[in-house]
Amino acid sequence: MDYKSKIAVINQKGGVGKTTTVINLAASLSIMGQNNLIIDLDPQGNATTGLGRSNNEEDKNIYNLLIKKRNLKEVIQKTEVKNLDVIGSNVNLSGLEVETANDADRAFVLKKILEEEKDLLSKYDNIFIDCPPSLSLLTIMALVASDELLVPLQTEFFALEGITQLVKTIDRIKVNLNPNLNVRGILLTMFDKRNKLSSQVDKEARGYFKEKVYQTVIPRNVRLSEAPSHGLPCVVYDKSCVGSKSYFNLAEEFIKKKNIEIDSAA
C-alpha cells in the first residue's frame, strides 16, 4: 500500500493562512528529513514567490504542465530548503478555465499527470497542492488529484459558515469525482488568545469537527507575514519565533497522525 500523501490545502476564502501553511508545514517536514513537493495551483503564485521563485517564469510552471507544453520533470524546481521542491505558478493559469471549456475531462488533467509520473514522484513523502481561494476549476482539479485535504480555518466570525459550504463541495466531489477524498485535518489559524472570539471559534470547531482539528493552533505573528517578502519560509527566516515554533509543532502532529493511521490500517 502506498502511504505517500497528495494533500490539497484549501479554503475558498482568502486571507486565512492557506499559502503560509503550505510553505511552512512543507518546509518544517523537509527540515525534519521528509521529501516534499509543493504544487502552486493559485494563479497569484504566492507559494512560488514565498519560496524564492518567480511567478513570472514563462517556461517551468504548472500552466505549461497542464497544457502539456512541458513534462513534470521539466517544471519541478529546487528551493532554498533542502528536500523541498516546487512547481511554480504563473498568471496564465487564470485563463485555463476558459481555454479548456470544451474538454469534458479537464477536472482529471492533474490527476492523470500525477498518476502517469508515479515513478518520478515516488521520492516525495508528501505532495502539497496550494489551491486558489475560490471553488473554481483549479480547485476542483486539486480535489480530484488529492487523497486528503487540509483546511486552514481562521479563528474569526463567519469562519464556520464558510466551511459548511466547503464541506458540501467536498461531499459533491466525493460522490461524483473522487470517492477516496478525506479531510486530513482542520488547522486553526490567526489565533489571538486575548480575543474571546478566537477561543469561541476554537471551541465550536472542535465541537463540530472533533479529532479532525489539530491540537496545534497557529497564532497571529508578524514574522509569518514578513517571511514571504524575503522569499523564505518563516521556519527558515526566523526559526525561533512563535509562528515557526507552531509550524514545527504542527509538522510533528502531522507525522504522528499519519503514523497512527498507518498502524490502524496495517
Image: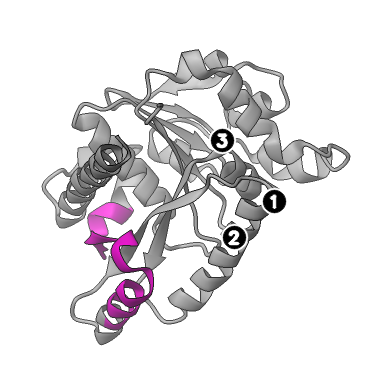
Distance from Cα at disc 2 to Cα at disc 1:
9 Å
Q: Residue at x 43, y 57 (%)?
A: 151
Distance from Cα at disc 3 to Cα at disc 1:
27 Å
Colouring scheme applied when the structure was drawn = one colour
**In the drawing, what numbered circle is on residue 171?**
2
197 left or right, relative to 56 = left
Q: Residue furthest bottom?
A: 196
In the depicted structure, whether residue 92 falls above or below residue 60: below
Element type at marker 2? helix
Question: Visible in this render: residue 229?
Answer: no
Q: Indicate the amino acid at tag 3.
A: Ser
122 left or right, relative to 137 = left
Q: Indicate the amino acid at tag 1.
A: Asn
Q: Residue 67: x percent and y percent?
A: 73, 27
Element type at marker 1? helix
Q: Indicate the amino acid at tag 2.
A: Asp
Q: Residue at x 21, y 48 (%)?
A: 253
Q: Which residue is mark 3?
A: 89
Q: Nearer the viewer, mark 3 or mark 1?
A: 1
Please report whichever mark, 3 or 2, sits nearer to the chain's N-terminal start. 3
Magenta part, dominant SS: helix
Q: Residue at x 62, y 24 (%)?
A: 113
Instruction: Read off the magenta span.
Output: 200-225
